[in-house]
Amino acid sequence: LLPKREGSKFLMLITNIKKLVPITSEPIFDAELEVEGGKIKWFGPSSFPPRVRVRGRLQRESRDIFDCKGAVVTPGLVDCHTHLVHAGTREKEFAMRAAGKSYLEIAKAGGGILSTVAATRETTFDELYALSERRLKEAISFGTTTIEIKSGYGLDTETEIKILKVAQKLAKDFPITIVGTFLGAHTFPPPLPSREGARGRGKYIDLLISEMLPEAAKLNFVRFCDVFVEKEAFTVAEAIQILTAAKKFKMGIKLHVDQLSAGKGAELAAELKAVSADHLEHISEEGIGALKKSGTVAVLLPGASFFLGMKPAPARALLDRGVLVAIATDYNPGTNPCLNLPLMGTLAMSQLKMKADEVWQAMTIHAARALNLEKEKGSIEIGKDADLILWEAADEIVPLYRYGSDCIRHIFAKGKQLL
Ligand code: NIG
Ligand code: FE
């Protein structure tokens, strides 16, 4: 049963919705939606309750009415994994990979994450903010109204905090929702210690735990701690050490795991009760079972595997076993310099064999869940934030089908019109 409308004055009534796609309930054709105080107050078929019309016009103050002229309306998109704040670009590495070099070979030769670290360290706060602001505007133009931003291109206290402060200022300046994640454990700072170089490794892990994590926590912005578990980055044991410390600062846990090689990363994420395990291109059978049991969200990043020319994550195996699957851009200068989340949805359909409705859940409610925001974000439900995308399309599949093209007519974030 639809709740009754109260009063006659609404902050805004969005009318003339051809198809409303709430994600967590059935689509409604020919719908209306009310927004009050930045929240969704009501939605339902436009014929209910019946309204008085004069010469075809609604009998309301016109400023309260937003005629969306037959658009398809979905929740705002949630990009739950990005490395938005960095300086420098790495197009030369893309060309090197196309000429036959591997991602790890390039990283070992001084490229990769460390080249972005060098550029980011050299860049002032203001320059870094300007670069990131431009990217954020681009992300919004693709329909993203909630975005997670990781640090991780500083690898020293000063630069990691600089990155987080840029993200925090963006969160203050923009009406969309930004979630901060500390990824000081992205890789080791130069000179890169070997897997056996216990001293160099231990020294950085000490710094992470005793200085960087407490400083990051002090900002009152960081909600998650992430670690990149990989042959050229952190071991499982090191990740446990860092994330156990992060828990003391009330940070949730995210992990970059099983991306370039199998490393029992999903099993680790489940054991640590991580909110999400991200990448998973090389997840094991046991890892899939572990994620199902722990309820950890599998965040798949089809743009990264596509751009690296590597095999994609086994989305079907995860979905068929009942694991919650989200997708995100993983925007970063190395493995996916793209902020177009609907395009990731297209890749998820064509490369990962996800169904259209699974992709929509993955870009909205499951992504919100990967940020512990499922109570406010990711679906059209009464009381949730009025983050809405109005698409110029026949239905919600069209923006995935017309890949790379712009089907967005209007964007609302917490009831504020951004486009
Ligand atoms: O998510 N996997 C590690 N981190 C990034 C890549 C970082 C980079 O190449 O700069 C990722 O793919
Ligand atoms: Fe990433």
Image (tube, rainbow, N blue to C red):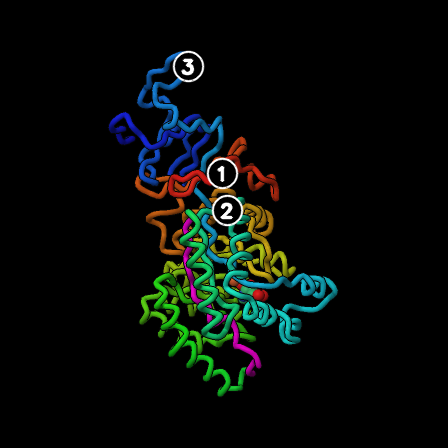
Element class at badge 3: loop
Image quadrant containing the N terminus: top left
Whichever of callouts 3 and 2 sits on the residue coming sooner in the sequence is 3
* CA separation in Å, label 1 and label 3: 27 Å
Which amino acid does the dot numbered 1 rest on? Leu
* CA separation in Å, label 3 and label 2: 35 Å
Residue 289, compared with residue 408, is above or below; it is below
Whichever of callouts 1 and 2 sits on the residue coming sooner in the sequence is 2
Kindly check if marks 1 and 2 are in contact, taking CB atoms under 8 A apart as contact: yes
Which amino acid does the dot numbered 3 rest on? Gly
Q: Which mark is residue 56?
A: 3
In the rendered image, residue 329, in percent from the top left (x then y), is placed at 53, 54
Residue situated in front as seen by the camera: 10 or 21: 10
Identified at 52% across, 73% down, the residue is 187
Residue where numbered disc 2 is placed:
140
Please identify the quarter of the rendering in which residue 109 is found: bottom right
In the rendered image, residue 282, in percent from the top left (x then y), is placed at 54, 65
Q: Does 217 lie within the magenta span?
A: no
Element class at badge 1: loop
Nearer mark to the viewer, of 1 and 3: 1
- State the residue lying farthest toward the top: 55
Which region of the structure is painted magenta? 176-194
In the rendered image, residue 378, in percent from the top left (x then y), is placed at 40, 46
* Label 1 CB less than 8 angstroms from ligand 2: no
Residue 252, compared with residue 414, is above or below; it is below
Is residue 353 shown to the viewer in this render? no
Is residue 154 shown to the viewer in this render? yes
Q: Which mark is residue 419?
A: 1
Residue situated in front as seen by the camera: 312 or 48: 48
Identified at 43% across, 39% down, the residue is 412
